[in-house]
Amino acid sequence: IREGTNKKDRQKWAPAYALRRAMEIDRTLGDLSAAIAAADELIQTVPESAYVPQAYLTKAEAQRWLGEGAKALVTLEGFRALIDQKQLGAGWQLEADLSALLSDAGLSGSAKRSRIADIVKAAGSDYPLLKNRAFVAEGESYLQEEEPDLAAALAAFRNIAADANADPATLAGAYAGIGESLFREVAGSMKPNKPLEEQQAQMLREALKNLLRVVVVYKDQSRYVQGALLYAGRAFDLFGTPNEQARARLMYTRLISEYPSSPAATEAKRFL
């Protein structure tokens, strides 16, 4: 794909399209630095392309996933300038607002959810996909609390999973969130040296159903696949049988092999 950007092409759209596809593939593979580089090249070399707004958002997202929230906010400042300059629609402004909210490390808890509610209200019925992405952020905010509200998180994620107006990344986030919430509920309620109760086993099975759905159906959503592999491994471990523990090891080794530099892989090594 990248080779095509360096050749003179009769189709004027080809270089921009090639860079967009390279950016998307890098993101899918979890090569975030390469995705950022492709986004930068697209923005700089074909600034009039219709793909440029998404390039800004993809770059900010990749920076955020790398733990570089401050850099993401700078990227979004450039995007806001483009929105003003090109008089882009309200949807792009809301996308910038949501991305900035997610990139702001100083925003959490009820303050973060208040901002999310503002975005949801502004999105209304005009931008249902964006609204559901905001709801994923709401669910994740409950999990990130010092004392996680697992019931509220689970309710938020279930609502998204039941809504047809959600893109693959949003659904992956919802199913991963359901799985993580259920796993943490069981892990927090287990008694030392006691076998799983039937209700706990049922919850773990539901957790695994959702986590493995992410791994199999949404395998191009690398950010969520990493967490799903980790929590699937831990859920298998909680069953405590040799067969389930072997499956747990498969989850951990796959995570470490496919995403070796991820925080999830680092954590998985503790359980091998």
Image (spheres, grey):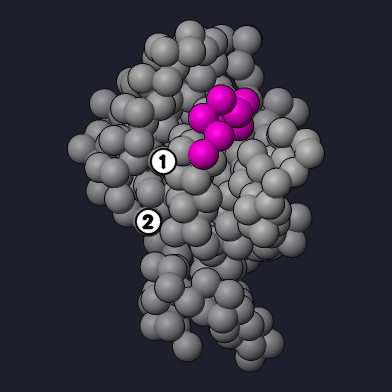
226 is higher (above) or lower (below) than 63: below
Of residues 238 and 76, the one nearer the viewer is 76
Dot 1: few (<14), some (14–19), or many (≥20) neighbours within 10 Å? Answer: many
58 magenta-colored = no
Residue matched to label 2: 66
Identify the residue at horizontal 49%, vertical 45% (top origin).
Answer: 41
51 magenta-colored = yes
Q: Is residue 199 visible?
A: no
79 is higher (above) or lower (below) than 61: above
Residue matched to label 1: 60
Q: Is residue 243 visible?
A: yes
- Tell me which label, 1 or 2, sits earlier in the chain: 1
Magenta stretch: dominant secondary structure: loop
Furthest residue in direction left, as rendered: 106
Q: Is residue 197 left or right of residue 96?
A: right
Q: Classify residue 40 by image quadrant.
A: top left
Identify the residue at horizontal 41%, vertical 32% (top origin).
Answer: 99
Q: Which residues are magenta?
A: 45-52
x then y, percent, for residue 44 = 46, 38
- What type is the residue that disc 1 sits on? Ala
- Mark identifier at residue 225: none
Q: Is residue 50 left or right of residue 270?
A: right
Of residues 116 and 4, the one nearer the viewer is 4
- What type is the residue that disc 2 sits on? Leu
Of residues 265 and 33, the one nearer the viewer is 33
Identify the residue at horizontal 74%, vertical 61% (top origin).
Answer: 216
x then y, percent, for residue 30 = 54, 61
Q: Is residue 117 left or right of residue 7?
A: left
